[in-house]
Amino acid sequence: MERKYYNPQIELLPRKELKKLQLQKLQRVVRKVYQKVPHYKEKFKNAGVKPKDLKSLEDFKNFPFTTKEDLFVDYPFGLLAEPLEKAVRLHTSSGTTGKPKAIFFSEKDIWSQAKLIARSLFMSGARSQDILQNSMTYGLFTGALVMHYGAELLGMLVIPAGPGNTERQIELMRTFGTTCIHMTPSYALYVATVIQEKRLEPGKDIKLKRVYLGAEPYSEETRKKIEKMLKVDVFNCYGLSEMGGPGVGFECPAKKGLHIWEDAFYVEIINPETGEPVKEGEIGELVLTTLDRTAMPIIRYRTRDLTRFISEPCPCGRTHIRIDRPLGRADDMFIVRGVNIFPQQIENVIMGIKGVAQNYQIILEGYDEMIVKVEIDRDFFDGRIERLLKLKEEITEKLRQAIQVRPKVELVEPGELPVSEGKAKRVIDKRTL
Amino acid sequence: MDYVEIISIFAENKPGKLEKITEVLAKENINILGFSIISVKDFGVIKFLVDMPEKAYQKFKEKGFTVAKIPAIGIELEDRPGGLYEVVKLISSKGVNIESALVYVAETRKKAYFVFEVDELEKAWELLKNEKVKFLKSSNFVNE
């Protein structure tokens, strides 16, 4: 019989036992950072907690959070829990604030993360005969390298393509029969468009079956668009360098939320204002603790990503909790006329409207004026202005319903807005208040 | 059915746009017989009646413009006071709604055509075809 799970013992572990395992691991990691990392010892002291106070998972909420700022304290080696010589890899994450965060991996850390990736890829249906084109940025960013190791561990053939150079990407796909590809959603849309323009036939010229998208938030509509354009299954893949990169959360074929591997991470969702756990199913900030990391464990890390738990059992049978696709980073949020808005809300609306292409841009200027530039679809234009005016009105009205603010919509020619080959810069804030 | 094709281009409202568009026609030696520009703040639509419509359409497409062809009916105007009035009166008497229009002056001070778009071309043609007016045919001016 064909294997359905990569690691059935762990993936199907009853929740009660999973929680027992988590408590054991948490106790170990809390002890370790208390003993080895002065910064954590001080934080614990200030919060009035000691490792022995962690008797149940309930007690863990009394332990202090780690924020991005903590990663800058005693930078770059301050949070190491083992001598530097034990570390074999450095990754940094620059984030939007500009300051780098240094994350160290021991050899064991590299392979534990790779195992999570292998497990995730297997869950999506990939096997050793598959060919993965890894079109993320190789380098200081974790996205490409961590995926690379995991895919190799599973036995896939990995093409370390890196991002950009779309002609070469497509050439690689055609020559080697790439079946899986890992890239950012905005670049995936772009590549899919070029494949269509070249009239390459999915399934024949292009043998892609699965697309793994990560590193930037995107909407369900974008997923559907890519799935339709390339005739593939698109899987959401969530991770962040601080937690070891991709492989933290991954979708199963049910495509209803991402499983977080709870044998490797302890997951909480909190109210970003109060720090208290949110009610079941409520949206809040994702907080993660590494359970297996040796070189640089991180306790209760505030990811700034907003999401919610999906507690219903998953049809795939895995017991590990699911989270909704992250709605965006708490940092991407912008406020117009007192309303909190996420770029994904805008994207959701735009992708659902016929007549527009995939690119859009949000410009904030003047006194809280919001302009949304949208590229029209070349084939939608029939030469008449009436149709364009109707389209503009439709976009304006649907956006107003979604975000409670009436934006000024501008239609622009296809190809006019900057195409992103990495993280898309969707919001330009020119307000001078 | 006598109808002609108008080339319509979507353009953002910004300096140099019309220049780029007309440059395409100039370089390809395509003659503009009539044109119209409609602008609504941030964008507009520019329409041309040209002597090589198919070539113009292909060239605009090649150069990445957002372009479409629209069928339109052309009726000859008399060059005298009331000339346009009579043609428009005839069209409206048939209940045909003019969506957009341009004028093609075939011979200065002698012959001109009122070229207009309608919602349903065939229906409009059925209503107008037996009228005693001269309709513009592609073969009158197309040169490709």
Image: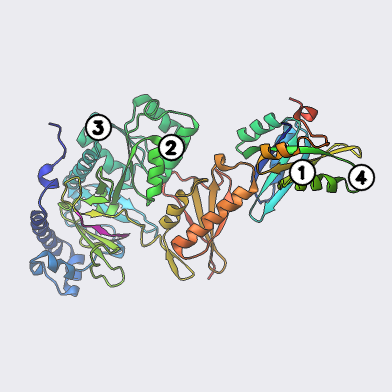
- Mark 1 belongs to chain: B
- For marks 4 and 1, the one nearer the N-term is 4
Q: Amino acid at mark 1?
A: Leu
Residue B102 tag number: 1
Q: Nearer the viewer, residue B114 or A51?
A: B114
- Circles 1 and 3: CB atoms closer than 8 Å: no
Q: Are marks 3 and 2 in contact (CB under 8 Å)?
A: no
Instruction: Using the numbered discs, state the Cα–Cα distance from disc 4 to disc 1 in whole angstroms.
Output: 18 Å
* Image spot of residue A159 (x, y percent): 32, 32
Spatial separation of the CA atoms under disc 4 and disc 2:
57 Å
Q: Are marks 1 and 2 in contact (CB under 8 Å)?
A: no
Above/below status of A297 relative to A416: below
Q: Which mark is residue A192?
A: 2
Q: Residue at x 53, y 68 (%)?
A: A368
Relative image position of residue A73 (x, y in whole percent): 28, 64
Residue with the mark numbered 4 = B80
